[in-house]
Image: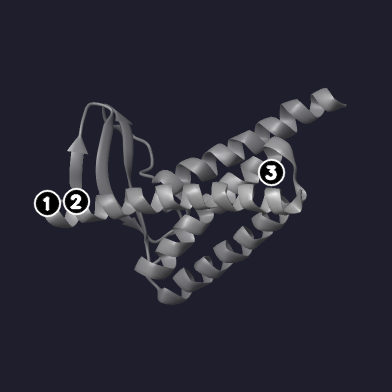
Amino acid sequence: MIKKNFFVTFFFILLIFLLDRVSKIHVIFLSKKLNNTDLFLSKYLNIQLIWNDGVGFGLFAFDDKIYYNTLTTIIIIITIIVFYFMIKAEGIERYSFMMIAAGSVGNIFDRLFYSAVPDFIDIHYDNFHWFIFNVADIFITTGVILLIIFELILKKRKK
């Protein structure tokens, strides 16, 4: 049973990580090939490459390397804690932590490899633009939302 759980968990995290990597590599490649960061523009969705050196959605971006390195270290520690919770959890809660962990590993990889995270999905309506994000951010956000739903709704039903 432990081996089966390990392989399912490993495959799920690897799948999310690879989906994130492939999407980022493709967008970076297109940006270099076209010599443009605006790759696709439409009424509600733009694919526009930006380099985020802050945390989620560009918050806490710093020009100073010491702050960037400290922030990266904190993110790595939090990811390790998420992995711990993932190991202890079961069911939908476990999959939620797996999504958060996989997305976090994808963004940590970028922070270490590029010194920034490539974000490129820009959802907007007229002049209102949501934060630009990437595939890893989608999984992190989905995992957090599922955990909130699990805590607020499903655990109350169990009581």
Which of the 4 quarters of the picture holds residue 114? bottom left
Q: Could you tell me which residue is drawn at 37 percent across and 37 percent down?
A: 130
46 relative position to 92: left or right: left
Q: Could you tell me which residue is drawn at 26 percent across and 41 percent down?
A: 47
Pointer 1: residues within 10 angstroms few (<14), some, or many (20+)?
few
Residue that mark 3 sits on:
94
Lower position in the chain sequence, tag 2 or tag 3: 2
Lower position in the chain sequence, tag 1 or tag 3: 1
Say if residue 70 shows up in the picture.
yes
Q: Residue furthest top?
A: 157
Circles 1 and 2 in contact, beta carbons < 8 Å:
yes
Q: Could you tell me which residue is drawn at 58 percent across and 40 percent down?
A: 143
Give the alpha-carbon distance from disc 1 to disc 2, as whole Å. 6 Å
The answer to whether 77 is drawn above or below residue 57 in the figure is below
Give the alpha-carbon distance from disc 1 to disc 3, as whole Å. 41 Å
- Residue 15: percent from left, percent from top: 48, 48
85 or 6, nearer to the observer: 6
Q: Residue furthest bottom?
A: 66
Q: Could you tell me which residue is drawn at 45 percent across and 57 percent down?
A: 107
Amino acid on which the number 1 mark rests in the picture: Leu
104 or 10, nearer to the observer: 10
Residue that mark 1 sits on:
34
Amino acid on which the number 3 mark rests in the picture: Arg
Mark 1, mark 3: which one is toward the viewer? Answer: 3
Which of the 4 quarters of the picture holds residue 125? top left
Amino acid on which the number 2 mark rests in the picture: Leu
- Residue 115: percent from left, percent from top: 37, 68
Circles 1 and 3 in contact, beta carbons < 8 Å:
no
Element on which disc 2 rests = helix
Pointer 3: residues within 10 angstroms few (<14), some, or many (20+)?
some
Identify the colour scheme used: one colour
* Marker disc for residue 30: 2
